[in-house]
Amino acid sequence: MEGLVPLFRMEGVSKRYGGVRALQNADLEVKAGRVHAILGENGAGKSTLIKVMSGVVAPDEGRMRLDGREVNFPNPAAANAAGIVCIFQELSLVPDLSVADNIVASNPPGRFGLIDRRAQRRIAEAALARAGGQDIHPLALVKDLPLSRRQMIEIARALTRTPRLLILDEATSALAAADVTRVFDVLKRLKVEGIALLYISHRMHEIAELADDCSVFRNGRRIATYQAGTKSDNEVVEMMIGREYSHAFPPKQAAAATTAPPVLEVRNLSWTPRLNHISFGVRAGEVVGLGGLDGQGQRELLLALFGVLRGIGGQILIDGKPVSIASPRAAKAKSLGMALIPEDRKTEGLMLQMSVRDNLSFATLSELAHAGIIDRDAEHDAVAEMIALLGIRTDGVLAPAGSLSGGNQQKLVIAKWLMRKPRIILLNDPTRGIDVGTKQEFYQLLRKLADAGTAIVLYSTDYDELIGCCDTVLVLYDGTVKRSLRGAEITEHALISLALNIDTTAGAAPRPAAAGA
Amino acid sequence: MKDWRFHLAEQRGTLMALAIFVAMFALYVANHPAGFTANVVQTAANKGVLLALVAMAQTLVVLTSGIDLSVGMIFILCNCVASYVVSGSAVATALGITAVIAVGALCGAINAAIVIFGRLQPIVTTIATGAVYFGTALWIRPFPGSSAEFNSVLADALTGKIFDLVPASIVVLLGVVVLVWLPFQGSVLGRAVYAVGSSEQAAYMSGMPIRRAKFAAYVLGGMLAASGGLFLTFFTYSGEASVANGNTYTLYSIAAVVLGGVSLFGGRGSAIGAIFGALAFRAIGDLLFVFNVDPLWQPLFQGLVLLVAVSIGSARLFQVRNRLELFG
C-alpha cells in the first residue's frame, strides 16, 4: 500500500546545456517500495534527469518534492542527506584510496574529525557482505581492482548511506551474470524494506525482471509511463527510438569461407597466470567472439594481441607468418593492420578535451602527413567521410569529443580506427552503456566490415550480442579456452553453462530469451 | 591477501626513503673525521630539520595534486618576521612565535583562496604569491639583522641537545609528526586531501569536503613552512631576506618530496616519507665534504645522486607486464 503522496515528485523540470535542451518540462513520480525503470536512448535526457535529482546539476526551471515538501539540492552531499543516493555510471570512486576508505567516504565513523579505522573496517565489511561483494578486500586500493569489482563497491557504498530513493544508472553494465544475480537479490530486498528504486539500464531483460513501473524518455521529455509487463519489448523500443524495430542482428554470412587460411592465428598463447595456452584462428570475414564471465582473461588476450603486454609465451601468426608485436604502434602498422577498440573510451580511446577532428585522425596521422606536416585538406576529407559513414552526431568537427553523447563517442573511437582500413579488428566490449539504436547501427557495421573481408575478434559481456554477431565464440574460463562454439552451437544455454564451467549436458536451465531476440 | 601486505604497500615509498637516508647517513658518519658523535648528529639534524619542515609543507600541497612554489618564500618571510617578534620575556616570545605561525597560515590561506575560488593553477598562483611574500620579507628586513632582545636562550635550547645526547630539533620534528601530521592524516579532512589529489571529480561525487580539504592543506602547509622559518631564526639568530635561500628551499623541498615517495600527481605518499627524503637529501649534499672533494662539485653530485635515488623508486616499472600500467 503506497501513501497518497509519492515519495518523490518532479514537475516541469528543464535543463539546457548551451543550445542543447537536455530536459524539457520533465515530470516524474517515484513511489516508495517500487522499482521504477527509466528507458530511453542515449541523449534522451536520462543522465540529466538523474543529475538534477541527485544535486549534481541545478535545473533551469521546475520543482522537486520529497514527501510533498519542496526540496533543492545545491550539491550531491545535500541530496544524500535527504536520502537520495545515486550510483553513477561514471564511477565515482577515488582510485588512490582503499575500498573501505571509499565506502565510508561521505560520512566516515569517528569523533572530533578523526576517523575510527576499526569502525570503518567493520562498516565496509558489512556493506560489502550486504551487496554480495565479500571477495573484495577492504584494504585493497580501488585503482588495483577491475571495473566489475569497482561497481560492486559503488553499490556497497550506496547502501551505507541509508537511501530512501536509490538511483542506479547503468549500475550493472560492467557486472558478470553471477554478480547481477546477487545485486538483484539485494535490490529486491531493499524494495521490500520500502525503499524506492530508480533503475536505468539498457539491458531489457534486467528491466523485465526487476521493474514495477517504467517510464520512457525521448528528447528530454517523458513520453509514457506504464506498469511493467503491459507492453511488449517491440512497443517499448519503438517508443524509445520512435521508429520501427527491425531485426536486431543482420544475417550472418552463411558460408564464412571455412577452408581459407586464417588471417590471424594464435598458438599456445600464454601470459602467466592470466592466460594459459590459448589457440585459435580468425579468417577473413569471420567474427570470433570471446565469451565467459567477466575477468577470465578476455581483456588480456586482446591486449596481448595488440602488443600491450610484455612477456608473452606462444606464437602469433599473421597471414601464416609468425610475428612479434612489440607495441600498439607495431600492431597498427600497415604490414599487420590491426586495430583495437578499447574498453574505456574515456581514458584509452579518446582525448576528451580535443576536437572530434583531432581524435579521428590520431591513429592515421602518419598517413595524412607529408614530411611531418599534417595535410589539412586530406585530414578534412577523411574525417568527413568517417562522420558520414558512421552517422556520428556532432556539433561540427571542431567540437570537443567530450561534448558528444556516449554512443557517439563510441562511434568516434571506432571511426578513428576504421580510417586506417584495418584487416584485423579487436573489440573490447564496445557496446557497454550504449543505447539500442546505436547498438543496431554497430551490429550492421560489424557485419559490413566482416563481409568486406575484415577479421574480427569481439569480446562482449552481452550474451545476446555474441549469439547474434559471431560466427564462432570462444568461451574463456580462468585464462583458458573452455570450448569453441560454432554456428548453431552458440546458444545462451551453452554460453552460460560454459562460462560458469558447468557441463552443458548436465543442463542448467536456460534463461528466458532476452530482448529483441 | 593478508592485511599486512596492504599496509606494507601503502608505506613502500616511505620505507624506500628511510632506506636511502640510512644508507647515505651511514656513509656520511662512517667517513666523518669525528665519527658517529652527538655533535655530528646535532649539526646534521639541525640542517635536516629545516628542510624537513619545508618538505612537509610541500607534501601537503602536492598531495592535493598541486605544487607550492612559494613555500621557500613563506619560509624566508617567517624568518624575517621571527627576527623581530621572537624576543623579550617568555610571554612575549610565545606571542611572537604564535604571530610567526599565523603569518605562515595567512600566506597559505591566500594561496588557497586564489587556487580554490580564483580557480588559478597552483603553479601560477604560487609563483606570483611567492614573489609577493619575498617582497614583503625584503620590505620588513632590507638588511640582515635581528631584534636587540632576540630570545637566544630559547634558540640555543631548541637547536642544542637534550641530556647532551639527543638533538632538540629532532624532538621538535617528532612532536610535529605526532601532534600535527598523524592526527591530520587520520582525519576526515586529511583523507579528503588524498581524495582530491587522486580524483577531484570522484571526491566531489562522493560528497567529500573538497574545498575545505584544499584550504586545510595550504594553510597547514603555510604553518609548517613558518615553523621552518622559526627554526632558521633560532639557528642564525637573525632574519635575512635572501632570494637564493628561498628558491633553494623551494626546489629542495620538491626534491625531498619526490625522494620521499610522494607522487607529484597527488593522492599518494606521506609527510613522513618527505621528512626522510629531506634528511637523505641533506646527507647526500654533505657527503662530498667528508670525502674532501672541492665543494664546487656539490650541486652536480647532489643532482646525480638524486637522479639515481629516484630511479631506484621507479625500478619496478621494468617489471610491469601490462604496458598500460606505465601510464597509471
Image (cartoon, coloured by chain):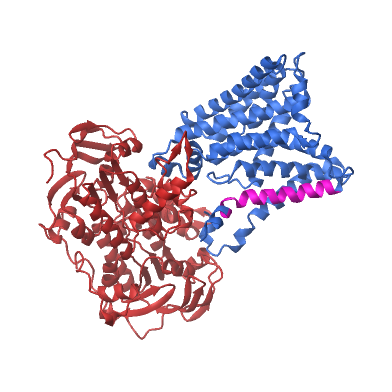
Q: Please indicate whether residue A218 sits to the left or right of residue A451 in the image.
A: left
Residue A128 forms part of the magenta stretch: no
The tint of chain A in the picture is red
Task: Please state the horizontal and vertical placement of residue A376, each as a whole percent of the image.
Answer: 44, 51
Residue stretch in magenta: B8-30
Q: Main secondary structure of the magenta part?
A: helix
**Residue found farthest to the front:** B163
Residue A421: name its quadrant: bottom left
* Nearer the observer, B296 or A162: A162
Magenta includes B18?
yes
Residue name at image x 38 percent, y 47 percent = A402
Above or below: residue B6 compared with residue B142: below
Q: Position of residue B239 (x, y in %)?
A: 74, 21
**Horizontal and vertical percent for residue B274?**
64, 42
Looking at the image, can residue B274 be seen? yes
Q: Colour of chain B?
A: blue
Residue at screen point 38% across, 48% down: A401
Residue A247 x, y percent position in the rendering: 19, 67
Front position in the image: B284 or B161: B161
